């Protein structure tokens, strides 16, 4: 079956009754069909290569939000600080934003306005948002919540391979791996249909090894579960490489032909004894040996990391350690083998390729690369010198809001940092100190509740565009219907704002006599097809080259894998077969060593705290907490702790507890489970208010990626 | 601030210190003087080298030569002139220092046996890379080897040689192996494990003399027996190399005496690693040596002037093909009063497994784990951190397999409670499936279509089929309700 365009959705065309699209939630981007019968909209799974006809409960119920009572259908304005949000018309709302932004930039400079995007935005919207920040606002301050998702793996991948694509091979390769190592990944809860590929793998006799501090639903299916203390994955990876080295299991020919820098890594891991890793992590040396053997002595082995390994102040080095292991075993680029990371958010991959990241321009170009600036500036019709330089990573940006040197205004698209940011109380206080907070969202999220202006925007079933899934496969999102009256698309919002901002500065075209000033309509088209056409040109020649990807080509097949530089040429399902996209064509080893968590446990805060997800909720829960079936399945936050620990604390199952860190506390019922280490407590982060896990988390960040240390901090637990 | 730092010794401690200094202050002038002719190497991997699994370059350590440090190998230091603040080397050089660090390590003990002075070619201690080369040279063409000394190092050497196909016998004067770490039953299990790997043991016998010639080596024992082999490896312990320190008038006991900042009796001289004696203790292990190197680096660079060396409890770990041994704490000693002691033991000698744990006040005070002990990682961490032991002590012996088994659906659907979740992905209970059946669904596919069970990860497909089969058996006559199967709304 092809991903056939059974429906065409262009402005002016009557909305179809059926749309073949993809789920609005995670990066698996399960294929689904939406059918409208009268008022009723039904979801049905499609047999797409990623989900193979499966859907989890989030996907099945995705349409429940389309006509939900909580849905915003009119802009909201707050007339004075502390006042209530009131309904307003679009012109009034956009005028207020336009005037506010202009005034703030005039008084405090261009960088006084910041933009915060999201990994759920389509490629077209992410691209337009980046362009809007750089061209219309000309601020350097733009970043997005993907910084808290993929940035460590992205930085490590780029460092090692010269390129960051979550999976450098199709998902189906997982099913053929003889050994599959999942590090800090729990797809059985976060992307259940992916488990179909793992079932394939085990039916073929493959071995599944899961590294997780909790005996998760995924770990229960594993042949071997390594249960390390949070924050010790790097030591585990180096010990695995040490074992492979001392057992003579390295692929020496591959290392010699396809990599650089191994000698330093070899000398470093020589000092990383498995016994030391055992002491740090609690993973028995015998299990480390079994894991190394399972990876090294088979034909096809795949190592995947996810947030559990990556959301640390040493996330980049941890991923690097696993990449070192994969390279030393000769896995990347070998058919059916390799290293990859499991992307989280729906467009976590595409969202980081097209310019909403502080240091990047479209096509995964670096904003500090003169050639990249020149190319993109030409597409945008501006002087390269007018493009701002790199901004700062997400947490640093939010942390600076409303401070003496920080931005005074923030535009938020597709994100809910009040729930999802680390040390969330601090972030909340920063947002409150802004002169102007603008939030574009479907519902009154916890962040929208703080906004001065809330702009109601279209949902996934009401817009066309593309998403790039965890495989680097560019997919089509197709509209079933128009947005309801009073709701605009994000692209229309940007166009409306651009119209209110442009004309203040003579443009490059005007100054250089290169034609008339671009009108806002020309610079910020509202038709996603037009935006995609421009995105293709902007990405041309960059690492994530989409210039050969067209909507028609995606429609004709099951998506297109980037890079795809030529419309008539092949796409790239598998990367690195012959060379790596580094200057010398070789992958780069880099020596890394374990270091302790940013916040060690102590007498006052003696327990390790870690966060994660549950099956029936997604991210900050702004959407899924409003779906009745999902709320029934996962009604609220909880604190998972081992019965031994609970016994020492005198806490019974279901009893309310407080988890206290140096930054704040959360209160939620205790959930006793032997599936977690007795020295560690866990809470999901989907809920706001008292149960907000991010009230507790640490805002220490990785020095390379800016990834906060969501996955470990020191806490104490008390009866509430 | 300290200007010129000279490190005497380029072993694992000295090299680590140079690296730690470089990491903190790349511009500092550091001179490293190593007596051995090689770049720094990883002593712990020598037994692996002996086993033939790796090559010599694989034992190299990360080094700082060429990154600001002046590393001189093959340079033996002959004297310290504390008054002039300089060291003298065998080749006549002098190196002035503002701070001197002794990392001279230890030397293999050669027992005072007749026939070992001078050391014959076929008799080699097992300590350095050169020793390793000599052993390998002697092992070439050899069929058998003797190892004198059944401590950790001797057993590693024995295992390495056995891995090369040699017929190996370990001779040990005590009644069981590794008596400092193991009790008698553990030693016996270990001997059995070694026998399975081709290593014989002769216990409780003392060597009385060695005779070596071109054809082989003979070891005479005090029970009148004598053993012949092509090669004899000596692993009779080590002695800290304190000669330089003693000659310079520094306080020396068994090792060079140091304080919590690793300083000797001369505040301009520190000592780390095997040659240092801290709190009355010699370590002889790498991890403490590296921790000491970190302390000295912090002190000398001023990065953390308050830092103090705090020894961690020692865990002896021997993990090699076929052998998995962890020993720690007071498991060997007799309890000495105080709070009552709990002892947990488990033995399965036929499979080479033995465990003995000692608990006092809910804390693990010692353990011996030999063979397949799945909780060894947990035990090591509990001991290391002094964390409370599990309420169910058995989990320490039997691992997570006990008590933490995942809750699996009951074998027969009849035994499942209605509230039991069958499909996690779509939150479908057994009760919901039964309700669907009563509403007219008759196959697993129909149950799935109506409830979405098994449409997520697909993992519960068999369970849904099982429930359909069970219902067909126990409830075949359930009539479809009015309205049939058009759409069954189920409260999940």
Image: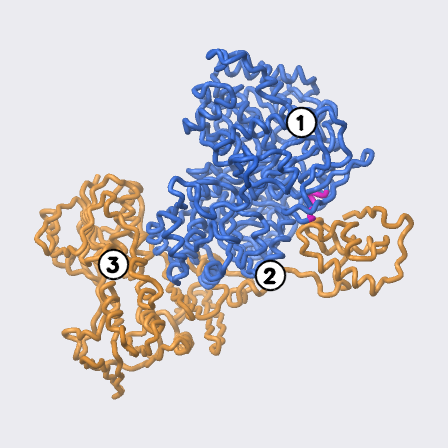
Q: Is disc 2 placed on a helix, strand or loop?
A: loop
Which residue matches tag 3?
B277
Chain that bears disc 1: A
Viewer-side label of 2, 1: 2
Disc 3 + disc 2, Cβ < 8 Å? no
Placement of A100 over or under B218, stated as above or below? above
Which residue matches tag 1?
A457
Q: Are marks 3 and 2 on the same chain?
A: no
First reached walking from the N terminus: tag 2 or tag 1: 2
In the rendered image, the quadrant that contains the C terminus of chain A is top right
Q: Nearer the viewer, residue B10 or A574?
A: A574
| Label 1, residues with CA under 10 Å away: few <14, some 14-19, many ≥20 | many
- Image coords of residue A340 (percent x, y): 51, 47
Q: Nearer the viewer, residue A125 or A564?
A: A564
Disc 2 + disc 1, Cβ < 8 Å? no
Q: Is disc 3 placed on a helix, strand or loop?
A: strand
Magenta residues, start to end? A53-60
Chain that bears disc 3: B
Placement of B246 over or under A51, stated as above or below? below
Chain that bears disc 2: A
Chain depicted in blue: A
| Label 3, residues with CA under 10 Å away: few <14, some 14-19, many ≥20 | many
* Rendered image quadrant of residue A521: top right
- Image coords of residue A461 (percent x, y): 70, 34
Q: Are marks 1 and 3 on the same chain?
A: no
> Which residue is located at x 61 percent, y 31 percent?
A414
Give the color of chain B as drawn. Answer: orange
> Which residue is located at x 50 percent, y 32 percent?
A363
Which residue matches tag 2?
A204
Is the image coloured rainbow, by chain, by secondary structure, or in one colour?
by chain
- B297 sits left or right of B323 in the view: left
């Amino acid at each position: 079956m092809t991903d056939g365009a059974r429906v065409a959705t262009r402005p002016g065309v009557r909305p179809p009754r059926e749309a073949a699209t993809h789920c609005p939630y995670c990066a698996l981007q399960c294929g689904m069909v939406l059918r409208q019968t009268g008022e009723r909209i039904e979801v049905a799974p499609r047999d797409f290569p990623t989900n193979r006809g499966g859907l989890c409960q989030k996907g099945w119920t995705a349409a429940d939000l389309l006509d939900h009572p909580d849905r915003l259908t009119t802009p909201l304005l707050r007339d004075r600080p502390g006042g209530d949000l009131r309904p307003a018309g679009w012109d009034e709302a956009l005028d207020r934003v336009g005037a506010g932004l202009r005034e703030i930039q005039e008084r405090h400079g261009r960088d006084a306005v910041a933009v915060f995007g999201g990994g759920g935005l389509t490629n077209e919207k992410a691209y337009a948002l980046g362009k809007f920040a750089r061209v219309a606002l000309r601020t350097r301050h733009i970043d997005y919540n993907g910084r808290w998702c993929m940035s460590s793996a992205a930085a490590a991948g780029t460092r090692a391979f010269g390129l960051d694509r979550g999976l450098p091979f199709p998902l189906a390769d997982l099913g053929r791996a003889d050994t599959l190592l999942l590090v800090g990944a729990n797809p059985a809860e976060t992307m259940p249909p992916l488990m179909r590929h793992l079932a394939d793998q085990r039916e073929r006799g493959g071995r599944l090894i899961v590294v997780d501090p909790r005996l998760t639903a995924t770990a229960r299916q594993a042949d071997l579960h390594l249960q390390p203390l949070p924050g010790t994955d790097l030591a585990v990876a180096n010990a695995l490489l040490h074992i492979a080295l001392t057992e003579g299991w390295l692929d020496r020919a591959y290392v010699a032909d396809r990599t650089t820098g191994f000698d330093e890594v070899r000398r470093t891991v020589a000092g990383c004894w498995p016994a030391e890793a055992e002491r740090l992590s609690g993973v028995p040396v015998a299990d480390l040996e079994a894991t190394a053997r399972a990876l090294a002595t088979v034909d096809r082995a795949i190592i995947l990391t996810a947030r559990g390994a990556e959301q640390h102040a040493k996330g980049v080095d941890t991923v690097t350690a696993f990449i070192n292991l994969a390279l030393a075993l000769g896995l990347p680029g070998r058919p059916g083998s390799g290293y990859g990371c499991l992307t989280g958010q729906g467009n976590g991959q595409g969202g980081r390729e097209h310019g909403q990241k502080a240091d990047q321009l479209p096509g995964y170009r670096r904003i500090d690369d003169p050639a990249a600036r020149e190319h993109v500036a030409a597409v945008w019709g501006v002087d390269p010198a007018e493009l701002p330089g790199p901004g700062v990573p997400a947490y640093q940006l939010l942390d600076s809001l409303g401070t003496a040197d920080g931005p005074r205004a923030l535009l938020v698209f597709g994100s809910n940092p009040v729930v999802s940011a680390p040390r969330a109380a601090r972030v909340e206080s920063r947002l409150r100190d802004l002169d102007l907070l603008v939030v574009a969202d479907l519902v009154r999220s916890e962040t929208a509740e703080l906004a001065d202006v809330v702009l109601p925007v279209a949902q996934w079933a009401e817009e066309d565009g593309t998403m790039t899934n965890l495989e680097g496969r560019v997919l089509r999102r197709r509209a079933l219907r128009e947005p309801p009256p009073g709701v605009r698309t994000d692209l229309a919002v940007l166009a409306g704002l651009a119209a209110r901002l442009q004309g203040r500065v003579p443009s490059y075209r005007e100054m250089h006599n290169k034609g008339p000033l671009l009108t806002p309509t020309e610079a910020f088209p509202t038709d996603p097809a037009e935006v995609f056409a421009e995105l293709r040109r902007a990405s041309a020649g960059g690492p994530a080259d989409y210039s050969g990807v067209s909507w028609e080509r995606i429609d004709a097949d099951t998506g297109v894998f980037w890079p795809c530089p030529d419309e008539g040429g092949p796409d790239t399902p598998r990367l690195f077969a012959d060379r790596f996209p580094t200057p010398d064509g070789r992958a780069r080893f880099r020596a890394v060593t374990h270091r302790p968590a940013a916040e060690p446990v102590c007498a006052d805060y003696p327990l390790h705290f870690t966060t994660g997800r549950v099956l029936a909720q997604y991210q900050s829960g702004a959407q899924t907490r409003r779906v009745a079936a999902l709320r029934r399945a996962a009604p609220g936050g909880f604190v998972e702790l081992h019965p031994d620990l609970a016994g020492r604390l005198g806490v019974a199952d279901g009893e309310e507890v407080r988890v206290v860190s140096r930054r704040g506390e959360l209160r939620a019922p205790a959930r006793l489970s032997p599936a977690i280490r007795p020295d560690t407590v866990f809470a999901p982060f989907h809920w706001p208010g008292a149960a907000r896990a991010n009230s507790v988390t640490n805002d220490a960040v990785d020095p390379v990626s800016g990834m906060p240390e969501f996955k470990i901090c020191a806490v104490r637990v008390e009866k509430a | 601030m300290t200007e010129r730092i000279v490190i005497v010794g380029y072993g694992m401690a000295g090299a680590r210190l140079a690296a730690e200094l470089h990491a903190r202050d790349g511009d500092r002038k550091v001179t490293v003087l190593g007596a051995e002719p090689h770049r720094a190497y990883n002593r712990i991997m020598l037994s692996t080298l002996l086993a033939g699994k790796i090559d010599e370059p694989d034992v190299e350590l990360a080094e700082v030569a060429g990154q600001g440090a002046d590393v001189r190998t093959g340079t033996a230091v002959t004297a310290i002139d504390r008054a002039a603040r300089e060291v003298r080397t065998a080749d006549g050089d002098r190196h002035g220092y503002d701070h001197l660090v002794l990392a001279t390590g230890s030397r293999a003990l050669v027992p005072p046996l007749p026939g070992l002075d001078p050391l014959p070619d076929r008799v080699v201690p097992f300590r350095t890379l050169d020793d390793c080369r000599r052993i390998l040279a002697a092992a070439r063409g050899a069929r058998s080897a003797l190892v004198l000394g059944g401590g950790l190092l001797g057993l590693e050497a024995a295992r390495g040689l056995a891995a090369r196909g040699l017929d190996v016998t370990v001779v040990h004067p005590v009644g069981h192996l590794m008596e400092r770490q193991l009790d008698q039953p553990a030693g016996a299990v270990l001997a059995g494990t070694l026998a399975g790997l081709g290593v014989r043991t002769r216990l409780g016998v003392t060597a009385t003399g060695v005779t070596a010639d071109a054809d082989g080596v003979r070891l005479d024992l005090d029970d009148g027996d004598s053993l012949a082999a092509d090669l004899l490896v000596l692993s009779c312990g080590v002695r800290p190399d304190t000669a330089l320190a003693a000659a310079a008038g520094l306080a020396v006991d068994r090792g060079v005496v140091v304080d919590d900042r690793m300083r000797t009796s001369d505040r301009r001289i520190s000592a780390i690693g095997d040659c240092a004696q801290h709190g009355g203790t010699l370590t002889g292990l790498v991890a403490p040596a590296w921790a000491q190197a970190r302390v000295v680096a912090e002190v000398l660079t001023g990065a953390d002037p308050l830092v103090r060396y705090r020894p961690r409890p020692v865990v002896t770990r021997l993990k090699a093909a076929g052998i998995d041994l962890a020993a720690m704490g007071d498991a060997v000693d007799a309890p000495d009063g105080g709070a009552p002691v709990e002892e947990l033991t488990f033995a399965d000698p036929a499979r080479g497994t033995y465990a003995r744990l000692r608990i006092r006040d809910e804390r693990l005070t010692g353990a011996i784990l030999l063979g397949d002990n799945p909780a060894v990682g947990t035990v090591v961490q509990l001991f290391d951190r002094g964390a409370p032991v599990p309420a169910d002590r058995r989990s320490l012996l039997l691992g997570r397999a006990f008590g933490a088994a995942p809750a699996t659906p009951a074998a027969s659907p009849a035994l499942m409670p209605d509230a039991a979740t069958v499909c996690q992905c779509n939150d479908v209970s057994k009760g919901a499936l039964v309700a669907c059946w009563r509403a007219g669904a008759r196959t697993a596919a129909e149950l799935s279509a109506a409830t979405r069970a098994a449409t997520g990860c697909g993992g519960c497909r068999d369970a849904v089929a099982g429930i359909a089969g069970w219902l067909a058996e126990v409830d075949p006559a359930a009539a479809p309700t009015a309205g049939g199967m058009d759409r069954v709304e189920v409260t999940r």
